[in-house]
């Protein structure tokens, strides 16, 4: 199976961010105060539990950020010389490969979670005992949901129960295994017995909040393993209007949310760090100009500025259809433009904070001393000011993530969010909103989006709290 | 005080001009009026004549900044910038795509917006401050801990779910109030209850947590310890000392949004079908009515600047130490 790797712009940025994150981690490990702060984060139990959950989301997002296009089978090509390779228009990702069955097995329309039959009655023609055709209205059998049961649909409950039990046992075994290896690791490091190590993990008096990680892992496995075992043969969260599996949509939404939450900060950070430091350090007319710029931008209500910018971007995209080779590329560029717009509208807050802090820092003795020694401004900023602003930047980064994910849903609802063809929590909610009025009610799409979005944002908020408590010098009391 | 206010008002002018320039650049320089015409008319019917007609109907056929054909001041006044952007300072917002006067529309839609936003704001502030005081009173107990957990959970839920859930539960299952709509006269109250309630509930999480931190910062100060040492009850300390001093940081966040209440809430109004400014904006965005969006951006920033000035005034009211001389 040949394929052509496709690097979408957002993929490149996501991997750049992974690189930047690694670099940040390496820098933090060399800077004692930052290292101490990260240690404090590691000790926070809610923070570490949230990190475990977030890592699962990030793994899904990263898998979904490796794209490729399959090579098309060249059927009538025996005669001439090998034709130039043709590739499918559809851009797939590694996640699509892993979750292939979820993507491909589309029903006709709505079906309930774990259903074997469709949601609405249909007219069908059935051959009766005499061999005559008879029209009949009944719930048609799904094409894929629970197809392995064959004729014995009544065994669905026992089948589901069996799978749940297997998942439960697997989850417990897996987390017990992780717990055991964590205990052995700790025992090795402390030089005590494995039993003692386990006791201290259980009591929570370890340097790193192992008990929270293990607890979160158990919870995660208890949720994900049943879903994984069930989604092989059922639609765990049902199907939507066009018959697509809702769980697959959820998996795809994760990447959109992560891109919005993370790439936006990539746009925002350079702007606010550079302008904030320059304004605070050089003061004078530079300061006035930068202050004027951010006051003006922040005085435009965010949603309206975003709306105006997105409307304009739509015009640009619509008038240049030749820029994009595939629909995925267009949707991707629109996503990036949204990130860019969100970044441009949200850098002002952080910039103001950094300017204030720089104003304070530049009056301190060690910077005055550096200036007296004739150290260049660039070097003072790079060596003395920037490292002392890192805690503000890190706090702002994690605090912004959750609000950006929430903002995406609202913007997509208003119609100024991601491309309508792109699967995201916002478009899912938007599509599912009218379905509550149906009879019988279609609730599963909305419920699934609610549950997973809550998990993502809640984890991000908890981590943000832990990071803020660890990095904010005002919080670092005697404890 | 008056001199200070005047100075602040003067300072607002360059900011408004900046906002005006930004929106102008966004709407006319990034995309030429030709692009907008093509967008509005749809791809099929685009002929050069149709575009020219569309532009001349809306006055977009003039030059952007300088009209070389014009005589005297007309060099500057007979341009898109002057006609479409500079005139906004005089309250002239032009016409929407459907031909209606935007300024008139804004005035009539302000009422419904305020009818939702004002009760939400006042009651919401009351409820969240009360909750925050409760948590501060029971600080470092299980009630406080779980209260904060609840707040974090509540602020992690998208505002869309509050609205969808509230409409479903209260209007569809319990059938207490109509799902959406708006009545002009006194009947309006039954349309207002649900949006106001949902507005309050969706704001509880983040505000309560924020006010709680402010209260806790205040509670550890020396004057509070003195008040307790005098033998005042904890309740008196909270209400007479902590609450009044904590008002200053609370006011900074709160007063800014008061003028923006006129703008209404985009989501609430569009979900509940309330004919306010929020739904006006959403409709304009969906219909790609650039004139209306431009007008709303301008009004929004003007109101924000008013909010900043109001914040400064409110400081002097609650904190006698702050004087503007």
Image: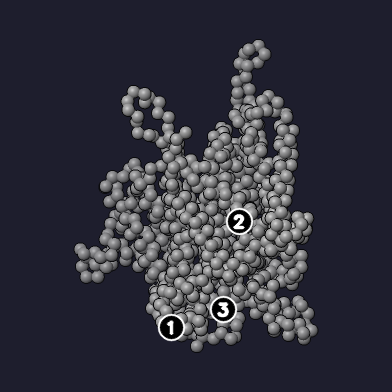
Residue that badge 3 annotates: B314
| A400 versus A433 height, above or below | below
Q: Position of residue B83 (x, y in %)?
A: 32, 64
| Mark 3 element type | helix
User: Quick one: label 2 or label 1, which is nearer the N terminus?
Assistant: 1
Residue that badge 2 annotates: A457
Label 1 CA crowd tier, 10 Å (few <14, some 14–19, many 20+): few
CA gap between label 3 and label 1 equals: 46 Å
Q: Position of residue B282 (x, y in %)?
A: 49, 55
Label 3 CA crowd tier, 10 Å (few <14, some 14–19, many 20+): some
Discs 3 and 2 share one subunit: no
**Could you tell me if the residues under marks 3 and 2 are in contact, i.e. CB atoms within 8 Å?**
no
Colour convention of the picture: one colour
Label 3 vs label 2, nearer the camera: 2
**Could you tell me if the residues under marks 2 and 1 are in contact, i.e. CB atoms within 8 Å?**
no
Q: Quadrant of residue B247?
A: bottom right
CA gap between label 2 and label 1 equals: 48 Å
| Mark 1 element type | loop
**Could you tell me if the residues under marks 3 and 1 are in contact, i.e. CB atoms within 8 Å?**
no
Q: Nearer the viewer, residue A364 or A57?
A: A364
Q: Position of residue A474 (x, y in %)?
A: 62, 74
| Chain for numbered disc 3 | B
| Residue in the image at 40% along x and 26% along y | A75
**What quarter of the picture does the C terminus of chain A occupy?**
bottom right
| Chain for numbered disc 1 | A
| A30 versus A320 height, above or below | below
Q: Nearer the viewer, residue B299 or B35?
A: B35
Mark yes or no: residue A25 visible: yes
| Residue in the image at 41% along x and 36% along y | A87
Label 2 vs label 1, nearer the camera: 1
Residue that badge 1 annotates: A373
């Amino acid at each position: 199976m040949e394929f052509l790797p496709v690097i979408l712009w957002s993929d490149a940025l996501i991997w750049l961010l992974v690189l930047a994150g690694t670099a940040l981690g390496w820098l933090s490990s060399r800077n004692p105060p930052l290292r101490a702060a990260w240690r404090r984060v590691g000790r926070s139990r809610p923070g570490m539990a949230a990190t475990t959950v977030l890592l699962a989301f990030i793994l899904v997002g990263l898998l979904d950020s490796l794209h490729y296009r399959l090579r098309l089978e060249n059927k009538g090509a025996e005669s001439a010389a090998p034709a130039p390779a043709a590739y499918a228009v559809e851009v797939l990702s590694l996640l699509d490969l892993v979750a292939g069955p979820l993507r491909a097995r589309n029903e006709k329309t709505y079906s309930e979670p774990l259903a074997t039959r469709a949601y609405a009655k249909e007219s069908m023609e059935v051959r009766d005992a005499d061999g005559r055709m008879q029209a009949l209205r009944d719930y048609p059998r799904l094409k894929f949901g629970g197809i392995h049961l064959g004729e014995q649909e009544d065994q669905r409950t026992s089948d589901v129960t069996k799978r749940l039990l297997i998942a439960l046992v697997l989850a417990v075994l897996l987390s017990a295994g992780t717990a055991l290896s964590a205990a052995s690791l700790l025992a090795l490091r402390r030089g005590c017995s494995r039993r003692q190590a386990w006791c201290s993990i259980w009591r929570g008096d370890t340097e790193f909040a192992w008990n929270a990680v293990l607890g979160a892992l158990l919870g995660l496995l208890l949720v994900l393993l049943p879903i994984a075992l069930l989604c092989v043969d059922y639609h765990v969260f049902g199907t939507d209007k066009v018959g697509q599996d809702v769980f697959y949509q959820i998996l795809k939404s994760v990447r959109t949310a992560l891109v919005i939450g993370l790439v936006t900060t990539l746009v925002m950070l350079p702007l606010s760090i550079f302008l904030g430091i320059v304004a605070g350090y050089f003061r004078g007319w530079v300061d006035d100009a930068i202050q004027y710029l951010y006051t003006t931008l922040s005085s435009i209500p965010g949603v309206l500025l975003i709306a105006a910018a997105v409307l304009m971007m739509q015009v640009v995209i619509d008038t240049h259809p030749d820029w994009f080779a595939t629909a995925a590329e267009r949707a991707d560029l629109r996503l990036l433009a949204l990130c860019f717009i969100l970044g441009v509208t949200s850098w002002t807050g952080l910039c103001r904070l950094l300017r204030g802090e720089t104003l304070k820092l530049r009056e301190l003795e060690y910077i005055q001393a550096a200036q007296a020694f004739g150290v260049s401004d660039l070097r003072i900023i790079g060596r003395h000011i920037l490292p002392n602003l890192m805690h503000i930047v890190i706090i702002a980064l994690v605090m912004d993530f959750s609000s950006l994910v929430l903002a995406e849903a609202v913007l997509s609802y208003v119609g100024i969010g991601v491309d309508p063809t792109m699967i995201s929590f916002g478009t899912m909610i938007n599509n599912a909103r009218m379905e509550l009025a149906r009879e019988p009610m279609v609730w599963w799409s909305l419920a699934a989006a609610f549950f997973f979005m809550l998990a993502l944002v809640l984890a991000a908020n908890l981590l943000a709290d832990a990071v803020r408590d660890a990095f904010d010098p005002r919080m670092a009391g005697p404890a | 005080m008056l001199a200070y206010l005047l100075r602040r008002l003067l300072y607002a002018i360059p900011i408004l001009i900046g906002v005006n320039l930004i929106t102008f650049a966004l709407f006319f320089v990034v995309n030429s009026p030709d692009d907008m015409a093509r967008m509005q008319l749809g791809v099929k019917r685009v002929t050069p004549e149709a575009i020219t007609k569309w532009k001349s109907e809306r006055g977009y056929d003039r030059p952007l900044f300088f009209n070389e054909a014009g005589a005297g001041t007309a060099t500057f006044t007979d341009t898109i910038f002057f006609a479409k952007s500079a005139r906004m300072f005089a309250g002239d917002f032009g016409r929407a795509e459907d031909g209606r006067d935007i300024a008139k529309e804004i005035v009539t839609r302000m009422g419904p917006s305020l009818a939702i936003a004002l009760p939400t704001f006042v009651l919401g502030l009351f409820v969240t401050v009360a909750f925050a005081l409760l948590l501060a009173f029971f600080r470092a107990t299980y009630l406080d801990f779980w209260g904060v957990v609840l707040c974090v959970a509540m602020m992690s839920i998208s505002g869309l779910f509050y609205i969808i859930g509230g409409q479903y539960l209260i209007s569809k299952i319990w059938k207490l109030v109509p799902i959406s709509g708006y009545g002009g006269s006194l009947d309006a109250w039954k349309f207002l209850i649900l949006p106001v309630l949902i507005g309050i509930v969706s704001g509880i999480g983040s505000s309560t947590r924020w006010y709680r931190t402010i209260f806790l910062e205040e509670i550890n100060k020396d004057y509070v310890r003195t008040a307790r040492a005098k033998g005042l009850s904890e309740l008196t300390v909270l209400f007479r000392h902590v609450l009044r001093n904590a008002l200053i940081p609370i006011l900074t966040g709160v007063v800014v949004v008061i003028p923006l209440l006129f703008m209404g809430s985009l989501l609430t109004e569009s979900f509940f079908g309330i004919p306010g400014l929020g739904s006006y904006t959403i409709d304009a965005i969906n219909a790609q009515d650039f004139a209306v969006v431009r007008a709303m951006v301008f009004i929004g920033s003007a109101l924000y600047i008013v909010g900043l000035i109001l914040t400064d005034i409110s400081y002097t009211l609650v904190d006698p130490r702050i004087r503007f001389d």
